[in-house]
Image (cartoon, rainbow, N blue to C red):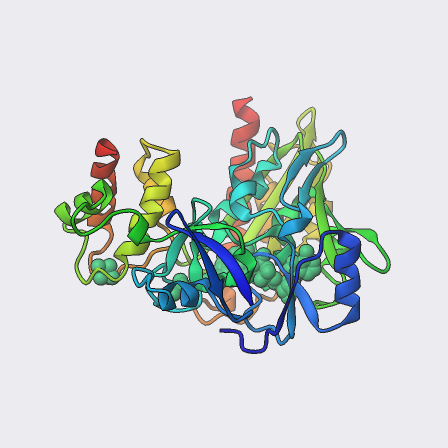
Amino acid sequence: MQIELTINGKLKSLEIHPGESLLETLRKNGYTGVKYGCGTGDCGACVVLLNEKPVNSCQVLTAAVDGESVTTVEGIGTMDKPHPIQEELVKAGAVQCGYCTPGVVLSAYALLQTNPHPTEDEIKTALDGHLCRCTGYVKIIEGVKNAAEKV
Amino acid sequence: MLENIKEWFRPESIAETVEIIANGNAIPYAGGTGSRSARALGLIDLRRLNLDYIREENDWVAIGAGTSFNKIANYQWSDSRHILALALGQAASNPLRNLITIGGSLAFRPAWSNVPTPLLALGASVKVAGAPATEYPIADFLHLKRNSKFFITEVKVPPAPGYGVYHRFARTRFDYAALDLAVYIAIRSDTIEICRIAVGNLIPVARRLAELEKNLTGLKISDSGISEILKAVDLKPLKNSNFSREFLLNMLKTELVRAFTQIREQIYAN
Ligand SMILES: Cc1cc2nc3c(=O)[nH]c(=O)nc-3n(C[C@H](O)[C@H](O)[C@H](O)COP(=O)(O)OP(=O)(O)OC[C@H]3O[C@@H](n4cnc5c(N)ncnc54)[C@H](O)[C@@H]3O)c2cc1C
Ligand code: FES
Ligand code: FES
């Protein structure tokens, strides 16, 4: 079936299978910043912004979001021009293997858009859907706090 | 990839939705977080039905079936209906709470759902379209067969001017709860006039503890015998791979006593 999706601000016309997940659609169209971790909604590696809110793209069927707007990490920053959240996560030592990082960046981005000065508890709630097997979260929270000062 | 899905339906009205459900192998698609295992051939997209709302009416608050957990959790509740917000704001994870809907949760009703327990304590009802279109008190609704060909349109929650508490016990923040508990109490001159105590997750279908409620109604909230009455609760918890049944029953007793302590604190703070 044919759908339209605005991805990182650009309108795309896409041919999809009716049972295809948003994670699958995005990755096969080159948005590989969206990571496949568990496929069951448990890890947060696949998080993207759907109409500016974080969602697990493995839990969304693409057909259901026809006409809506998706932001992936590619729409937040680039290698040459990283977003302050990305810079602060790196500075805080919150990125090791980096597999969880795109999802974390997007959840932090959505949080700071609506709540520019979050408390530590609000940061923890915003990131409660992300598993990081490397850093132990302390550095991630520190990175988001520092980013809040900059954004 | 759900290979079995061949077709998407995008109805524009509730009547059209009911007709599609009745006709064939298509099922509603709400948050999509519980539809993975569905064997349906088609999915019915509910997004065009405008069921994503929280509306204050005179005698109740109406919550559209397509309303997400986060929308309910972030709503400014002016009375003890905020226990629904507490429950849904702790369920699953932030990105999932943006997807999971109250209607999809009531239709799917996994044992770990945190929707039924607060709704039982608040005396809510569930509106269903289809044949026949009707409104069920939540306790009756929870005993309807799952996957029946009905379509949930709205949840109605009456005012809750009394005192409410919600507790959710899980190993970690993002884990299915092993037990959840909601208590709603209305008092007059220090005496318990309305008492609703509901438990979920540790039993297959959430329910109210009618015996406890009966024993507590009419007592002074300060009565020192209340803790003993609460500790007399008896039910057989579901088998759980992390906790023994004995532990869960003891945890329920502890949470009940804590809930009443918290309610007294709310009362004395006023
Ligand atoms: C990792 C994970 C953790 C979770 N943890 C929790 C938790 O701790 N607490 C909690 O409460 N929930 C939790 N959930 C959510 C729960 O398991 C279900 O996935 C959820 O309740 C389903 O709601 P939905 O809106 O996504 O429904 P859908 O997946 O869209 O639908 C579920 C079923 O209901 C039917 N349906 C949907 N809407 C309607 C309607 N209006 N009328 C009739 N039928 C309908 C569908 O056809 C389908 O059969 C979790 C989910 C995941 C993936
Ligand atoms: S891949 Fe989606 S939550 Fe793990
Ligand atoms: S940095 Fe490796 S999983 Fe988070």
In the picture, measured across the screen, residue A113 lies left or right of residue B18, that is left
Q: Is residue A4 left or right of residue B57?
A: left
Residues B260 and B152: in front is B152
Quadrant in the picture for residue A31? bottom left
Ligand 1 shows up in the quarter that is bottom right
Q: Residue A86, position in %: x, y?
A: 21, 47
Quadrant in which the N terminus of chain A is drawn: bottom right
Q: Look at 56% across and 57% down and name the residue there.
A: B31
Against A2, is A6 above or below? above
Q: Is residue B10 visible?
A: yes
Q: Position of residue B75 (x, y in %)?
A: 55, 35
Q: Is residue A17 above or below residue A31?
A: below
The picture places residue B9, in percent across and down from the top left corner, at 67, 63
Residue B233 visible in rendering: no
Q: Foreground: B198 or A117?
A: A117
In this picture, residue A130 sits left or right of residue B149: left
Name which residue lies at 81% across and 58% down: B130
